Amino acid sequence: MALRVAIQMDPIELIDINADSTFRIAEEAQLRGHELFYFTPDMLAFQEGRVTARGWPLTVRREVGNHFSLGERQEIDLADWDVVWLRQDPPFDMAYITTTHLLEMIHPDTLVVNDPVWVRNYPEKLLVLQFPDLTPPTTIARDIETLREFRARHGDIILKPLYGNGGAGVFKLDPNDGNFNALHEMFSGLSREPLIAQKFLRDVEQGDKRIILVDGKPVGGINRVPAKGETRSNMHVGGTAEKTALTEREREICDRIGPLLQEKGLIFVGIDVIGGMLTEINVTSPTGIQELERFDDINVAAMIWEAIEKRRAG
């Protein structure tokens, strides 16, 4: 089944081809005979009833520094395509949300992955709130008194922007940390959004596990270990990926959330688990495919495409 596939992503010239999940998705699509088209989110438009994008036919190759070729720039009507990948990174701001509204207009006749409605409704740090028994104690608030009382109840906490990504703006605060008020003032000055606070999980020293689910089913995970002196395990801030196996508790978490992910068309999802506690459900632009494939010698990208092809055929 040859599909016409448009990929909405960040600038392709900047990616690391040995780590980027979008590149791996495009590479596997090309191997399967699918036609590729690439555009950046700022090139998405609504024009008199049509959802269009200006971009380029795309060819990818696994050559560092020479990993893609582009055809002639053109405008396409996305309703004429079989699949659109929604793959730009957060921050999950109004620009991001607007793309979900526009792509919703062509879905599901054109299959948008992940479903833009549920990407919009279930951003990373909010979907977990539906599973409080699986998560560490959490509060979402802008009011400093609420946040201060949460810290008083739980001691060491993690404080971070609700719609951030990649470990940016993540702070560990102990009960006596004198930076609490200053951080609140800084965040409040940057945006009107609330903050998210979670009880600090000391098990993060042993790693923050990223588990990949394809169409609601876990296919494996990698353990991301923070650098010495860090509480953040994100690999682009110095975390190290390690091979790991899923525990019984982690499979229980996947069994609980998997049916909802499948129902909502969230085909490619990455969840974060620390010490058996679910901390995030990443649906916007999850990563981890290439590391998992190398550690477990499996083809995760093929599993994702098989799920997509099944949906298109059905």
Image: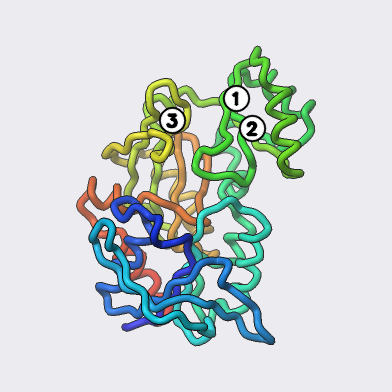
* Sequence order check, earlier mark of 2 and 3: 2
Using the image, determine if residue 278 lies above or below residue 285: above
Using the image, determine if residue 9 lies above or below residue 123: below
Using the image, determine if residue 156 lies above or below residue 284: above
Q: Is residue 69 left or right of residue 126?
A: left
Question: Residue farthest to the left?
Answer: 297
Q: Please name whichever residue, 99 or 157, is drawn nearer the observer in this view of the structure.
A: 99
Residue drawn at x 38%, y 69% is 307
Q: Residues within 10 Å of mark 2 (few under 14, many from 20)?
A: many
The answer to whether residue 231 is visible is yes
Q: Amino acid at mark 2?
A: Ala
Q: Amino acid at mark 3?
A: Gly
Q: Please name whichever residue, 218 or 26, is drawn nearer the observer in this view of the structure.
A: 26
Q: Nearer the viewer, mark 1 or mark 3?
A: 1
Q: Secondary structure at mark 2?
A: strand
Q: Which residue is tagged 2? A: 197
* Sequence order check, earlier mark of 1 and 2: 1
Residue drawn at x 34%, y 52% is 16
Q: Amino acid at mark 1?
A: Ile
x and y, in percent, of residue 314 in the image: 42, 81
Indicate the quadrant where residue 154 lies. Answer: top right
Q: Which residue is tagged 3? A: 275
Q: Is residue 238 left or right of residue 133?
A: left
Indicate the quadrant where residue 267 lies. Answer: bottom left
Please give the label number shown on residue 157.
1
Q: Secondary structure at mark 1?
A: strand
The quarter of the rendered structure image containing the N terminus is bottom left
